Amino acid sequence: MLPQFISHVQQQHLFPTGQEVLLAVSGGIDSVVLAHLMHAAGFPFAIAHCNFHLRPDDCNRDEQFVRQLALQYGVPIFVAQFDTLNYAQQFHLCVEDAARKLRYDFFEQVRSQQGYAAILTAHHRDDSAETFFINLLRGTGLTGLHGILPVQGHVVRPLLPFGRDEIETYAAAHGLSHVEDATNASLQYRRNQIRHLLLPLLRELQPTADHAIAQTIRHLQSVEQLYNTLLQPLRSQLVHPQPDGTVRIALPMPVQSNEEQLLFELLRPYGFNYATVADILSSTHSGRQFYSATHHAVLDRQQLIIEPLASKVSHPFPPLRTAQIKNFSYSSLDWKALPPTTALFDADKVLLPLSLRHWREGDRFQPLGMTCGTQLVSDFFSDHKYSLPDKQRQLLLVDAADNILWIVGRRTAHPPRVTPTTTTLLTVSVETDVPTQVN
């Protein structure tokens, strides 16, 4: 197996064999064999391991095993500890999707910080076949049937030409020990049902089933490449990345043929499935939200606004700077030169201390120029065509009594305005990029 492995890596140029790569090792037989092959081939590597704390005793055992493996090979090791259940709940993910996102985010972080040439995982031919059938039974599109790709960005899977039987034979021949995940034998999971029931039956019916499935997957990969080439003009027409990191996708009109298939292809890079696409097309109310494993989407009129889930994590508010100026000259104020990150108030009309917060349902304020009464902040948002993500990001400056003084970057309140009778000027600056225009 070692000569075939070296030949495959070199002929397919999977990764630079003279540069150090990051090897994802769980402690299972597949990743243990990959580590042995890499060491025997003389390819330099480091090890990365994730402890998801889903099975406390087993997970800690696995971590210690992998640490010993790194010590045995004399290679660096990077270990991450995750509260996976809490993360899954926070971002509305199933545990499997949460673990996958945490795992690959960690690998990429280590790769980019340490300068490794690639991330290697131990997926093999049987894994690809299992993925093919899982997606087939889900009712997937063409992309779901291409199995596991050998290279995706910086992620490389050099064991795809080899089956589980070859890996087990290699491990036995070299006396390699590994840890076993007890859930691998449980028929409670769809992948295990395919692994232990469906694939053995197919091999019994057709001894060459493994190679036939692999050949079909290769054909589908070629068809997918052609399909994506033909789809690109529509993607360019309907998908519009924004400077703030969001993506706006115009919904296909019902008159367009195969609108559901088209929208699925537009949303597929963001992790949305066919069921979600159907929900989107049947929705009529702006503001409805949808989640994939990696992204959050909001329906806003005839478009979707998509942002990564990571951008929805709460962050500390930006620094707030204030200064009071006495005996200033009102006539010398240059209002046009005032940056959107700074606002001016009559200090005698402001109750300190000041703070920043986000909008709440029912918030009201008296915008500059409104001499009586108040306006719902939500109506201000509607008048200025805020999307739901815009509303969620907008900062509000409030005084000690929670009165809104400033919709930051957009409009100050009328009561604390500066007038010719103002004796002390209060300047407030927010050290962040603020929206000066909302589409």
Image (cartoon, helix red, strand yellow):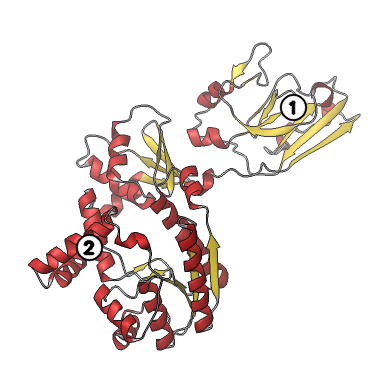
Say whether marks 2 and 1 touch (CB < 8 Å).
Answer: no
Residue 372, percent from left and from top: 67, 11
Residue drawn at x 50%, y 43% as measured from the top left? 90
Q: Nearer the viewer, residue 393 or 103?
A: 103
Q: Which of pointers 2 and 1 lies earlier in the amino acid sequence?
A: 2
Tell me which amino acid carries mark 2: His
Q: Which mark is drawn over residue 196?
A: 2
Q: Is residue 167 left or right of residue 21?
A: left
Q: Residues within 10 Å of mark 1 (few under 14, many from 20)?
A: some
Q: Is residue 365 left or right of residue 107?
A: right
Tell me which amino acid carries mark 1: Asp
229 relative to 211, above or below:
above
- Which residue position is annotated with label 1? 399
Q: Which mark is drawn over residue 115?
A: none
Q: Residues within 10 Å of mark 2 (few under 14, many from 20)?
A: some
The mark lying in front, picked from 2 and 1, is 2
The furthest residue to the front: 57
Specify whether residue 427 is in view.
Answer: yes
Residue drawn at x 35%, y 59% as measured from the top left? 183
Q: Is residue 276 left or right of residue 133?
A: right
Q: Nearer the viewer, residue 93 or 27?
A: 27
Q: Is residue 221 left or right of residue 176?
A: left
Q: Secondary structure at mark 2?
A: helix
Quarter placement of the N terminus = bottom left
